[in-house]
Image: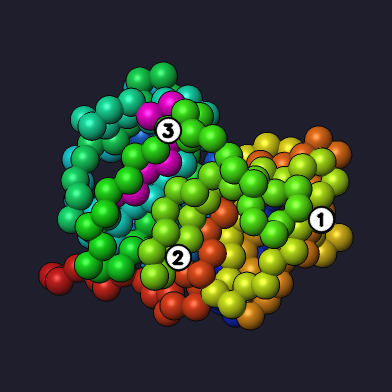
Amino acid sequence: MELNADFSQRSAVHAASLPWIPSPIAGVERRMLDRIGAEVARATSIVRYAPNSHFSPHTHGGGEEFLVLEGVFQDEHGDYPPGSYVRNPPTTRHKPGSAPGCTIFVKLWQFDADDRTEVRIDTDKRSFVPAPGRAGVEVLPLFHDAREDVRLEQWAPDADVALDLPGGIEVLVLEGDFMEAEERFSPQSWLRLPPGGRLQAQAGPRGTKVWIKSGHLALPQRAPKPAAA
């Protein structure tokens, strides 16, 4: 399966308006944003767990990165309330689920094969700081390495936001809204701009809170290799 798989092009998905698609696991549904591959795939999705649903224990061959949007995500390592940001690199293993139910934004099979850095951040317990040289923008860093930069940003009401994008960018709206290319982005809206592009956006009248990943789209984007028979 290929969905928004041309990374040289702008892609936008307003996921809140999409139907939920059942996964192979009962009680777990998803809204797909981009995807390369079959059930094991390089994928970006919004995933919803019904109360008391869970996956079987599994190992992340290509890594998993997620942000909890609603409810409480759970595994044997702990409970993750809204605002929790987690990176489970390749070779990590867990049994995910949710007793109360939850919704997460998740990216699979997008790590460097040698990455072993685990991250668990409760963003509600950290503070935003002004972004140097960017009026009306505050930043909460989540992760940075030579491949990518991941962060939350808050844009002040009606702020003009401009960024050159040598390595491309993904933006997911968490709160508020913004305009880009005469298109309005609201919660669960996702925008991907290619390397060499430019983000030119304006925050809505109530301001905007977004999750951002940048730099990574300059790298080859591939599906996982099929498992050996």
Q: Is residue 160 above or below residue 68?
A: below
**Image quarter of residue 76:** top left
Q: Secondary structure at mark 1?
A: strand
Q: Residue 119's spot in the image, x, y percent?
A: 32, 45
Residue 148: give its label: 2
Q: Secondary structure at mark 3?
A: strand
Asked which colour scheme the image uses, the reply is: rainbow
Q: Secondary structure at mark 2?
A: loop
Number of numbered discs overlaid on the protein picture: 3
Magenta stretch mostly in which secondary structure?
strand
Q: Label 3, on which residue?
A: 122
The residue sitting at the left extreme is 229
Q: Amino acid at mark 1?
A: Asp
Q: Residue 90's spot in the image, x, y percent?
A: 23, 58
Q: Earlier in the sequence, mark 2 or mark 3?
A: 3
- Which residue occupies 41% across, 19% down? 100
- Which residue occupies 74% across, 38% down? 176
Q: Is residue 118 left or right of residue 200?
A: left
Report crowding for label 3: few under 14, some 14 to 19, many 20 or more residues within 10 A (C-alpha): some
Decide which of 214, 109 is in the foreground and name it: 214
Quarter of the rendering occupied by the C terminus: bottom left
Residue 138 makes an appearance in the image: yes
Looking at the rendering, the stretch of residues picked out in magenta corresponds to 80-88
Q: Amino acid at mark 3?
A: Asp
Q: Label 1, on which residue?
A: 160
